[in-house]
Amino acid sequence: MTTTHLLYLHGFRSSPQSNKARILGDHIAATHPRVRWWCPQLPPSPREATALIAEGIASWPRQTMAVVGSSLGGYYASWVAQLARCKSVMINPAVNPARDLERHIGEQSNWHDPEDVFFFRPEYIDELRLLDTRSLTAAAPEMVLIAQGDEVLDWQEMSDRYPHALQLLQEGGDHALSNFPEYLDRIDEFLALA
């Protein structure tokens, strides 16, 4: 089944202006112009973010949609994959953001626009816990890109979280997956982009 609709979810403090979002969006536009692409700016509240996502994909055909997510967006992507029962690609995904983001409660700024300041609230931790899909069997095929040199998240924890996924492990590398363009063909093949 070919993918006709593709959702991209950025990470914590990130935006649709992230390198991976722009690279993948440009690639889709240039090589798969029939694919519907959506990369929303996610609000800091996980509850609000998932409500925005659910509303945005409500009319999408479940059998031909897919989701790609990076870091916290990878955590959200696993939730979307359960909701929509669709293929998913996670890039250096957050596995337990309720634990990892607790130390970030307070004022934060967007990586791509330091003037864009928001407050990461304590209640967002509980909102993250409600989205945890670790105890569920994958609803559809999964692929995970993991850089063993990730300086933000534990690569082994990521690998252990997705034991049945197609895992592409990169020796070294970094959280931003600077060599992301090298994986575009594998993503195309996995998602069977239209």
Image: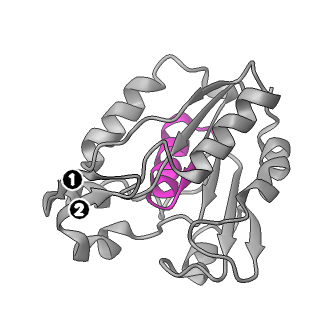
Above or below for 177 versus 32 = below
Magenta highlight range: 68-86
Task: Give the residue pinned by disc 2.
Answer: 108
Q: Secondary structure at mark 2?
A: strand
Nearer to the camera, 112 or 185: 112
Real-space CA distance between mark 2 and mark 1, rounded to the nearest whole angstrom: 6 Å
Classify residue 47 by image quadrant.
top left
Relative placement, left or right, of 20 versus 97 is right
Callout 1 amino acid: Val
Nearer to the camera, 143 or 83: 143
> How dense is the environment of label 2, judged by Cα within 10 Å: few (below 14), some, or many (20 and up)?
some
Q: Position of residue 52 (x, y in %)?
A: 34, 32
> How dense is the environment of label 1, judged by Cα within 10 Å: few (below 14), some, or many (20 and up)?
few
Looking at marks 2 and 1 on the same chain, the residue that comes earlier in the sequence is marked by: 2
Classify residue 55 by image quadrant.
top left
Nearer to the camera, 163 or 178: 178
Can residue 138 be seen?
yes
Residue 90 sits inside the magenta stretch: no
